[in-house]
Image (cartoon, rainbow, N blue to C red):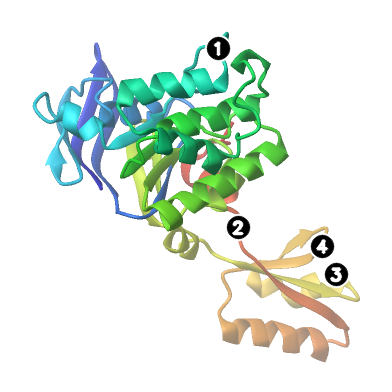
């Protein structure tokens, strides 16, 4: 759906994006992640032809984005970049009618988009009286009103409370399954991204440092085993050769094979201790992200 090759964006002498390769496959939810200032929004704007690349190629649905194809391709793309755009003094329905006229879509599309985002009972209210979550949902309704093949969302959960985040997440997850819309989404709230994406691309200082499935990314991490016993201090001494760590929940060992886990369990029991629990600890997306980029997400 999206294919990027050797994409570079410079402002003066500063290179803000330098991506060798990026691919978003049809039907997936692609999480585009990176620290603030990494180049996420700039890349998305180049995909949408809002920013001109210094160099490189961008293909959308197998066609190169250029002056000749721009209008046709953008008609097949919905987007929400840096927050929704709307007329706050008008009602939600007035805003949707403007979108209907601009995109030249039938009325049934507008009605369906409103239904999908769950704003049917709020369309006669002025947008200035909407909550932040309602404004975000209105922005998504505008973006999907043409039922595009590709939807690009830049921080769609930004500023939402936990309930609003969950609503937005569940909404986004339905779009590929029910409407065949491929989604590229950026976010700095990594635990939210983890619950909805199928693939991720991680950008840092303008460079892609990982791209692949979420499962593949997690396989690259080293899960830990936590042993909870009747005597943590003695457990630590018994397992000294495996470089144990003291944790509040027990003794933590990293990167053990199945055979080594069995060996450690036997050593604990043979040492006269009660083994209460063995628990595998996998790192969250946020922990892996920090490990890879050296930065917290915020």
Q: Distance between the residues labelled 4 and 3?
A: 10 Å
Sequence-wise, which precedes: disc 4 or disc 1?
Answer: 1
Q: Mark 3 points at which residue?
A: 232
- Which residue: 41% across, 18% down? 98
Pick the front one: 272 or 224: 224
Q: How far apart are marks 4 and 1 (CA)?
A: 54 Å
Sequence-wise, which precedes: disc 4 or disc 2?
Answer: 4
Q: Residue 295 carries which label?
A: none
Sequence-wise, which precedes: disc 1 or disc 3?
Answer: 1
Q: How far apart are marks 4 and 2 (CA)?
A: 15 Å
Sequence-wise, which precedes: disc 2 or disc 1?
Answer: 1
Please say whether residue 291 is visible from this viewpoint.
Answer: no
Q: Name the residue under label 1.
A: 90
Q: Looking at the picture, does residue 257 appear above or below residue 148?
A: below
Residue contact between numbered discs 2 and 1, judged by CB atoms under 8 Å: no
Pick the front one: 250 or 121: 121
Please say whether residue 89 is visible from this viewpoint.
Answer: yes
Q: Position of residue 26 (x, y in %)?
A: 30, 54
Q: Position of residue 273 (x, y in %)?
A: 88, 83
Badge 2 element: loop
Badge 4 element: loop
Q: Name the residue under label 2.
A: 283
Pick the front one: 7 or 281: 7
Sequence-wise, which precedes: disc 3 or disc 2?
Answer: 3
Q: Where is residue 233 in the image (x, y as percent from the top left)?
A: 86, 68
- Which residue: 64% across, 72% down? 242
Q: In which quarter of the image is residue 169?
A: top right
């Amino acid at each position: 759906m999206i294919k990027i090759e050797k994409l570079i964006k410079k402002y003066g002498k500063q290179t803000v994006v330098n991506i060798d390769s990026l691919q978003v496959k049809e039907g997936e939810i692609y999480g585009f992640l990176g620290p603030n200032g990494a180049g996420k929004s700039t890349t998305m704007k180049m995909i949408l032809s809002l920013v001109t690349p210094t160099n490189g190629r961008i293909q959308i649905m197998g066609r190169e984005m250029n002056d000749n194809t721009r209008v046709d391709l953008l008609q097949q793309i919905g987007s929400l970049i840096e927050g929704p755009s709307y007329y706050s003094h008008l009602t939600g329905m007035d805003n949707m009618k403007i979108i209907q006229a601009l995109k030249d879509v039938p009325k049934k599309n507008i009605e369906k988009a409103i239904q999908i985002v769950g704003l049917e009972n709020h369309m006669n209210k002025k947008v200035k009286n909407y909550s932040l979550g309602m404004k975000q949902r209105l922005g998504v309704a505008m973006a999907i009103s043409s039922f595009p093949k590709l939807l690009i969302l830049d921080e769609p959960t930004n500023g939402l409370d936990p309930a609003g985040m969950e609503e937005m997440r569940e909404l986004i997850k339905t779009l590929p399954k029910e409407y065949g819309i491929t989604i590229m989404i950026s976010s700095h709230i990594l635990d939210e991204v983890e619950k909805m994406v199928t693939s991720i691309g991680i950008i840092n200082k303008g460079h892609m440092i990982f791209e692949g499935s979420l499962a593949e990314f997690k396989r690259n991490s080293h899960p830990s085993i936590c042993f909870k016993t009747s005597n943590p201090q003695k457990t630590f001494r018994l397992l000294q050769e495996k470089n144990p760590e003291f944790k509040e929940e027990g003794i933590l060992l990293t990167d053990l094979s199945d055979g080594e886990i069995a060996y450690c369990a036997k050593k604990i029991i043979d040492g006269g201790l009660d083994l209460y629990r063995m628990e595998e600890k996998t790192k969250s997306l946020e922990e892996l992200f920090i490990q890879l980029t050296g930065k917290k997400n915020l």
